[in-house]
Amino acid sequence: MLLERVRAQLRAKSSASGEREIALRPSLYHDERRTIVLNFRQLADSLSREPEHVARFIFKESGKPGSLEGDRLILNGKIGDPEFAKLLQLYFKEFVKCPVCGGIDTQIQREKKFRYLVCEACGARTPVRKV
Ligand SMILES: [Zn+2]
């Protein structure tokens, strides 16, 4: 009976919080001096964000300059797979995931010089920094 109750609570918990994650699988290619993210546009699509916005975040946080070329992101410098995956997770946490309900149906709204993460599920408006 106790187990039943725990199960019921777990079900309630997972359905109420709307906690969701996105599977992000960056495909990296390294040459002598650069790191090339082959599926960068696809990654940005999964995050429902502009590739330019995600790219600016990556340049800033990694401290490595680079450019967008078609579907690819070119970084001048070496970034390992785990490091790049971590940058994407940081972006997801800051610019996609609603800090109030954990939902991912969000968008970034501009208002003068301010930026807000607006959640379609719970309506929360969270200020985010400009990148
Ligand atoms: Zn929310």
Image: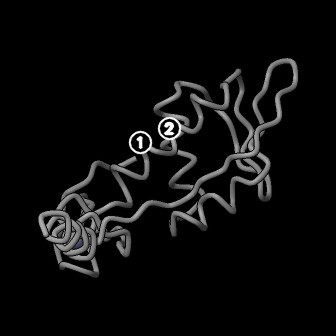
How far is mark 2 from mark 1, CA to CA? 5 Å
The residue at label 2 has a CB less than 8 Å from ligand 1: no
Residue 19 picture location, percent across and down:
31, 65
In the image, 67 versus 87, the foreground residue is 87
Name the disc covering residue 90, or none: 1
For residue 127, what is the image quadrant? bottom left
Give the amino acid at mark 2. Leu
Q: Is residue 111 something that shows in the picture?
A: no
Q: Quadrant of residue 41?
A: bottom right
Q: Is residue 25 above or below residue 59?
A: below
Judge by depth and name the residue closer to the eye, 91 or 86. Answer: 86
| Amino acid type indicated by mark 1 | Leu
Front position in the image: 48 or 1: 1
- Point out residue 15 in the picture as x, y percentages from the top left corner: 26, 76
Lateral position of residue 87 relative to residue 79, left or right:
left
Q: Quadrant of the N terminus?
A: bottom left
The spot of residue 21 in percent (x, y) is: 44, 60
Q: Quadrant of ligand 1?
A: bottom left
Is 29 on the left or on the right of 61, as rendered? right
SS for tag 2? helix
Q: Residue at x 42, y 52 (%)?
A: 92
Evaluate if marks 2 and 1 touch, with contact meaning CB atoms under 8 Å apart. Answer: yes
Is residue 62 positioned above or below 130 on the image? above
**Residue position for label 2:** 87
Which residue is farthest right?
A: 31
Above or below: residue 116 compared with residue 65: below
Q: Residue at x 59, y 35 (%)?
A: 84
Q: Residues within 10 Å of mark 2 (few under 14, many from 20)?
A: some
Residue 55 image position (x, y, % from top left):
57, 47
- Quick one: SS at disc 1? helix
Q: Residue at x 63, y 58 (%)?
A: 43
Mark sitting on residue 62: none
